Image: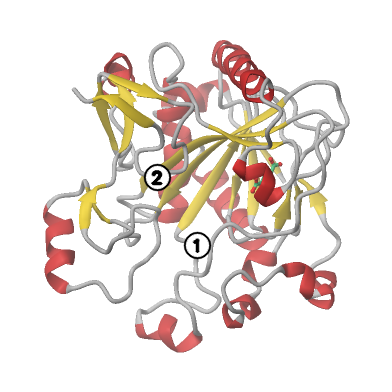
Amino acid sequence: MTYMCTESELSQGKLDPEKLQQMGDDFRNRGYAVVTGLISEESQKLLMDSVVEDAEQVRASSEMTPHEKHTGQGHLQLGLRRSAPYVRPDLLANPIIESIIAEVLGEGAWLGFYNGNVNMPGSTFQPLHFDRPFSWRSEEQAAEHGEDWPPRTTTLSCSVAFQDITVENGATEIYPGSHRETEVVTWPSGERLSNHPELIESWAPASRMEIPAGGICFRDPRMWHRGMPNSSDGVRPMIALTYHAAVGRHWRGAVVHDMASEDVARCNADPVLRLMDDSKLGDGRLVFEESARAVFEDNPSLHGISRNVRFVTKVDHTLDAHLLGGARVIQEA
Ligand SMILES: O=C(O)CCC(=O)C(=O)O
């Protein structure tokens, strides 16, 4: 089901409560819900042009990117520009987006990832996959923590369209409802869905994640999906903004079950701290340039969402898009 955000909801910074509830229920049942009318035409054009320019620069090299080698030719994970005017309030400080995040992930959710899924003309099929594991790995563990089974998601991805995303230009294939399939928790890490054709069949038919320009698909990253061939002659950007529930203590948003109680206390006292890959605590914020500061500070969150950002003098957004901070810091403040 597609929900429309009206002009009046946009100016008040909140959706009609009944619509928000319905949209949340739809998201929980089916694994996704599309909301239209969220991003201005000005932001759509500015970001569309910048992403196409950056993608063409990546393509100037004949080398496949690491993400392509891992997932499928023509599917880029592109770092996004982190300075004014490219950092847009209607994307990174949008009260409607944040009200939906608060509805699904609860108070204290935080932004953990800001990146671009770019599907190039002539791309191939990706293997069917899911982006996140379950945060509670068994019915017993979920019960111990007072969670239902199947458990709720602790991560939500916003897939943002700057032009109509259609079957022709490679709308993502999805298996609605598959985020509730608990058999995956019994699999060894890295196990491929393609080894389980009967299970896939049980969640068929697949659908396509078509998103009108200016709209966002709010997606449970556990839902099975894959990038599809882009048979148009244009680049298809789809921006990913990923938020995590407060319970996610790892800098990538994972729930850490065996965290030392003194580390939990330090995280509670200082919200920039997250667990790093080396199991120590560190600064887990995303980096942006000083020129983007006003976008965040002039638009404080109305819904208790942490933007989780820090500001530096210079970054290179084309490097380290998957690492801590989301871009390489060239010069600290
Ligand atoms: O760009 C898309 O349509 C999906 C991409 C995706 O799922 C991925 O790169 O992991």
The residue at the point 42 percent across, 55 percent down is 105
In whole angstroms, how far apart are the C-alphas of marks 1 and 2?
15 Å
In the picture provided, is 313 more to the left or to the right than 31?
A: left
Residue bearing mark 1: 153
**Nearer to me, 9 or 218:** 218
Q: Is residue 304 above or below residue 96?
A: below
Residue 14 seen by the camera: no
Horizontal and vertical percent for residue 179? 63, 65
Q: Quadrant of ligand 1?
A: top right
Do the residues bearing badges 1 and 2 touch, measured as CB atoms within 8 Å? no
Q: Secondary structure at mark 2?
A: strand
Q: Residue furthest bottom?
A: 140
* Mark toward the start of the polypeptide (1 vs 2): 2
In the image, residue 99 lies at what x, y percent? 43, 41
**Quadrant in the picture for the C terminus:** top left
Q: Is residue 123 visible?
A: yes
Rendered view: 31 above or below 283: below
Question: Callout 1, which amino acid?
Answer: Thr
Residue with the mark numbered 2 = 112
In the image: residue 224, left or right of residue 252: right
Residue 194 screen position, x and y as percent: 78, 68
Using a 10 Å C-alpha cutoff, classify the residue at mark 1 as few (fewer than 14 neighbours), some (14 to 19) or many (20 or more): many
Q: Position of residue 70 (x, y in %)?
A: 66, 51
Please tell me which residue is depicted at 42% across the width and 39% down the height of the picture. Answer: 98
Kindly give the residue lying farthest to the front in the view shown: 62
